[in-house]
Image (tube, grey):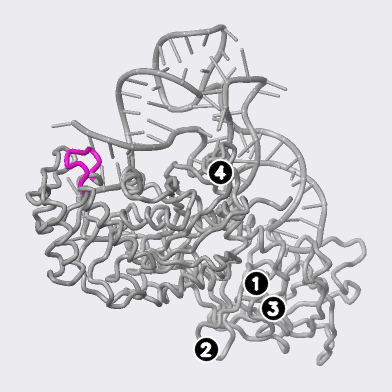
RNA sequence: UGGGAUGUCGCCAAGUGGCUAAGGCACCAGGUUUUGAUCCUGGCAUUCGCAGGUUCGAGUCCUGCCAUCCCAGCCA
């Protein structure tokens, strides 16, 4: 019994019932992106749900591009979407479709509605239509063209298709109910004239079907059993059902709505995301601070960790904002088990071991994972001159500071005990070097009887590999940036910090670019090859939990 | 003075009339530890938006109210 992709929720309950009642004997879902933008963490939920549910029930999940508006769509987006889905860990196999694959059938269904007297060509201008649609408190009024004959409508619609009318001069509308409380039912437009090159059908069409007409029919054509979408389409369900009830098709999928995923301190609307890119606030759609899948990928978030995050937040109809800490917890949880440990110094401070022989180098063994021997171990060079982290020295340290200060002994990870003897300052009064002594009996990090509270990381100066490290913090300093008048006001000016002089122990940089490493006591990092530089660049994936930060804060 | 939906711990979320209202995140208190990491232990809703009602028994059923969200594209 393999583990489920999706935890039980109200949708799986519906599916369970449908299967038990023999309404269906299999499950077919679909993920229907419009190729007009990049996928983001919100889409990840839909992907996990649709593909996950299908997998859990031994069903299939189609990838269907909802490409009914050539004005906004491009092949580049479609390709990027496919790449993101694959990276994310899902496979549509041979089931890749386009709504545009069905343009001929969609057109035929439209004629069928006309023939049944259930659709008509309307010559009103967009302004007139808006006026006659009414509003929440005012019912709509019938179009003066509503009662055209079937023959006339058919002739007009065919002429529309033939390109005899100007863009926007006519539309085809479903004849439903201009009095309906549900505005979607007030004779919705189902076809519009738009002379535009389509990514799939080229210039074959000058009329394109609208979402509400296309989506339900596409679902039915593909034999979708459960059509899962987000809450804002709840009002469209009556129209979804109306279309399928009034055309000759033997499949009627059930539309089920769930709430979309929101993560605190992030933004996911296409409009806002592109504003960040266009204004140069970020490095591009795949900036490691972006909530796009390509951003998360470049940041180093493992797909499996994101999937586990999605799984942990569940599926419901309640609008919610999930705390970013839940996402980070999922990332850490995954990385703690999978990331090899290495030592990297972000802000180097030179240390000289006065009683260590000059010119001597010895190799010390360090385990690659403290809890998992299968990771093996590596040899780390040790010598007289080292680098440690600047923050591991404090001039006036209190008792709770278990690291370097004059006279205090600490353990160098995997190496020796050293005692800080003196701090050397430059003219500006900054500490630039520590003079220490070591205990030759403490090789490997243990010495008889003596306990040392602190263990710090280090790198042999002569062997250190120079790297650039990029530290990331949340892009916004407001939990719900989208709720603000101007979300750009909430931009965190310190979301990126570049550390140009970081050091990494030898043998790591450039060895394997796809591995996420834990720089012990610092954070998780992954190589970023997006930009060529003289030094390898490492992106901080996620920090480790830091209870010291709390202690430090409390003790002032 | 329209239609649709949602309200269970700071954030998610189980619960489908009957033992003491799951679990995760966050938070708090301890323990282990050659990462102040991990791991482990304990704590954390007398109460389920509010008010009535039905019932031997209600978060679960009924009524009313309140709050929040979505809808007036020839976008999806």
Q: Is mark 2 on a helix, strand or loop?
A: loop
Q: Nearer the viewer, residue A145 or A387?
A: A145
CB atoms of marks 1 and 3 within 8 Å: no
CB atoms of marks 4 and 2 within 8 Å: no
Name the front one of labels 4 and 2. Answer: 4
**Residue placed under numbered mark 3 in the picture:** A434
Chain to which mark 2 belongs: A
Q: Is mark 1 on a helix, strand or loop?
A: strand
Q: In this view, does A132 lie to the left or right of A184?
A: left
Chain to which mark 3 belongs: A
Q: What's the CA distance linking mark 1 and mark 3? A: 31 Å
Name the front one of labels 4 and 1. Answer: 4
* 1 or 2: tag closer to the N-terminus: 1
Residue at (19% x, 57% y) in the render: A172
Span of residues in magenta: A175-183
Q: What element carries label 3?
A: strand
Q: What's the CA distance linking mark 4 and mark 1? A: 35 Å
**Residue placed under numbered mark 4 in the picture:** A12
Name the front one of labels 3 and 2. Answer: 2
Query: Looking at this rendering, what residue extends furthest in the front direction?
Result: A151
**Residue placed under numbered mark 2 in the picture:** A532
**Where is residue A433, by image quadrant?**
bottom right
Vertical position of residue A246 compared to residue A516: above or below: above
Q: Nearer the viewer, residue A122 or A272?
A: A122
- Taking the image as drawn, is residue A202 in sight? yes
Q: What element carries label 4?
A: helix
Chain to which mark 1 belongs: A
* 1 or 3: tag closer to the N-terminus: 3
Residue A516's mark? 1
Image x and y of residue A306, in percent: 57, 60
């Amino acid at each position: 019994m393999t583990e489920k992709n999706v935890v039980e929720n109200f949708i799986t309950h519906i599916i369970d019932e449908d299967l038990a009642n023999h309404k269906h004997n299999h499950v077919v879902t679909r993920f229907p992106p419009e190729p007009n933008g990049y996928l983001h963490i919100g889409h990840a939920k839909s992907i996990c749900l649709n593909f996950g549910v299908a997998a859990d029930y031994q069903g299939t999940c189609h990838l269907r591009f909802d490409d009914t508006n050539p004005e906004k769509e491009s092949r580049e987006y479609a390709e990027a979407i496919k790449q993101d889905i694959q990276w994310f860990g899902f496979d549509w196999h041979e089931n890749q479709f386009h709504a545009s694959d069905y343009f001929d059938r969609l057109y035929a269904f439209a004629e069928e509605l006309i023939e049944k007297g259930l659709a008509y060509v309307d010559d009103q201008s967009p302004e007139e239509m808006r006026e006659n649609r009414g509003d929440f408190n005012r019912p709509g009024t019938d179009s003066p063209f509503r009662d055209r004959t079937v023959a006339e409508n058919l002739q007009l619609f065919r002429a529309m298709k033939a390109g005899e009318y100007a863009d926007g001069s006519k539309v085809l509308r479903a004849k439903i109910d201009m009095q309906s409380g549900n505005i979607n039912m007030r004779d919705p437009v189902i076809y519009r004239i738009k002379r535009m090159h389509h990514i799939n059908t080229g210039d074959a069409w000058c009329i394109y079907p609208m979402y509400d007409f296309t989506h339900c029919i596409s679902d039915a054509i593909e034999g979708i059993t459960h059509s899962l979408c987000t809450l804002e389409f709840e009002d469209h369900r009556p129209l979804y059902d109306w279309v399928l009830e009034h055309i000759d098709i033997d499949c009627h999928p059930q539309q089920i709505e769930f709430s979309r995923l929101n993560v605190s301190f992030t933004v996911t609307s296409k409009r806002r995301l592109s504003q960040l890119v266009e204004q140069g606030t970020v490095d591009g759609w795949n900036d490691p601070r972006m909530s796009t899948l390509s951003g998360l990928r470049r940041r180093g978030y493992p797909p499996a960790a994101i999937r586990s995050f999605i799984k942990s937040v569940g599926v419901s109809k309640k609008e919610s904002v999930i705390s970013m800490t839940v996402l980070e917890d999922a990332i850490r949880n995954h990385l703690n088990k999978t990331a090899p440990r290495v030592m990297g110094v972000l802000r180097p401070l030179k240390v000289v071991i006065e009683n260590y022989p000059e010119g001597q180098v010895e190799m010390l063994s360090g385990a690659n994972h403290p809890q998992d021997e299968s990771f093996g171990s590596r040899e780390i060079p040790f010598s007289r001159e080292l680098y440690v982290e600047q923050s591991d020295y404090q001039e006036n340290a209190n008792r709770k500071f278990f690291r370097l200060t004059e006279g205090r002994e600490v353990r160098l990870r995997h190496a020796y005990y050293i005692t800080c003897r003196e701090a050397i300052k430059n003219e500006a009064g900054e500490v630039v070097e520590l003079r220490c002594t070591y205990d030759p009996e403490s090789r490997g990090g243990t010495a008889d009887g003596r306990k040392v509270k602190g263990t710090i990381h280090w790198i042999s100066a002569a062997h250190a590999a120079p790297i650039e490290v990029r530290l990331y913090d949340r892009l916004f300093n407001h939990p719900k940036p989208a709720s603000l008048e101007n979300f750009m006001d909430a931009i965190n000016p310190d979301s990126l910090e570049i550390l140009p002089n970081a050091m990494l122990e030898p043998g790591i940089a450039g060895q394997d670019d796809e591995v996420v490493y834990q720089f012990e006591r610092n954070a998780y990092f992954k190589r970023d090859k997006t930009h060529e530089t003289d030094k390898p660049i490492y992106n901080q994936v996620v920090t480790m939990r830091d209870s010291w930060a709390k202690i430090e804060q409390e003790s002032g």
